[in-house]
Image (cartoon, rainbow, N blue to C red):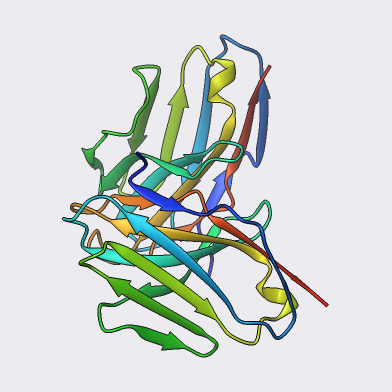
Amino acid sequence: RKEVEQDPGPFNVPEGATVAFNCTYSNSASQSFFWYRQDCRKEPKLLMSVYSSGNEDGRFTAQLNRASQYISLLIRDSKLSDSATYLCVVRTGFQKLVFGTGTRLLVSP
Amino acid sequence: GAGVSQSPSNKVTEKGKDVELRCDPISGHTALYWYRQSLGQGLEFLIYFQGNSAPDKSGLPSDRFSAERTGGSVSTLTIQRTQQEDSAVYLCASSFTSRDNEQFFGPGTRLTVL
């Protein structure tokens, strides 16, 4: 079983739609959680950290459920520019980041 | 300011040859990381440096892989006797300290082993 699992998608949504991605992690000792965004043939970039209380950044909302070892990302009012692969990332141990394989989002006009 | 830079951006080599990949982290960042991303796969952790030392080499897939960092700055990842399964994008990242949550990635080196 992979340490971080995501639905690879793709998720095809129209502009303006709300879309949600889920991620599960297997190591209960994981300490920090993130969503990174990766555009095609580009490097990953931090989108947002994920906190137990849930956090929001504009159209993006992240949630963490430690009991279920589950992380989510909600994107409201999708834009064409949101098309990318969204990577669920978990930090376990001192510094090592463990990446999911990513969920691909395609937003169409 | 300047971000993480990597060179070369693309490398094509023949099976059995050695290759060196270079990473220049953001100035002042003490922590440096190497990952690789194979086609359709997630990022795979290879090695982490704090300063010039490597507290975690757990991700290096075989003894053909080695990395060093000198002067607390530039790092080189060396792959000896390359194999076709080594073909991947090798990504370097840095962070200000080893406790920082955000790692800044370079553009990667796309390695193709023929």
Return the residue nearer the eye: B105 or A48.
A48
Query: Would you say residue A27 is visible in this rendering?
Result: yes
The C terminus of chain A, quarter of image? bottom right
Return the residue nearer the eye: A104 or B25.
A104
Q: In the picture shown, does residue A46 fall above or below A7?
A: below
Q: Residue A95 in the image: x percent, y percent?
A: 25, 53
Q: Residue A80 in the image: x percent, y percent?
A: 74, 76
Q: In the picture shown, does residue B57 fall above or below A83?
A: above
Q: In the picture shown, does residue B24 fall above or below B2?
A: above
Can you tell which quarter of the image residue A22 is in? bottom left
Residue located 56% across and 58% down the image = A103
Q: Residue furthest top?
A: B16
- Left/right placement of residue B11 relative to residue B32 reads right
Q: Residue furthest bottom?
A: A58
Q: How many discs mark residues in the rendered view?
A: 0
Query: Would you say residue B3 is visible in this rendering?
Result: no
Can you tell which quarter of the image residue A76 is in? bottom right
Residue located 34% across and 39% down the image = A1
Q: Residue B79 in the image: x percent, y percent?
A: 47, 22
Residue located 55% across and 21% down the image = B85
Q: Residue furthest front?
A: A68
- Left/right placement of residue B67 relative to residue B91 reads left
Q: In the picture shown, does residue B3 fall above or below B56?
A: below
Return the residue nearer the eye: B58 or B25.
B58
Return the residue nearer the eye: B23 or B91.
B91
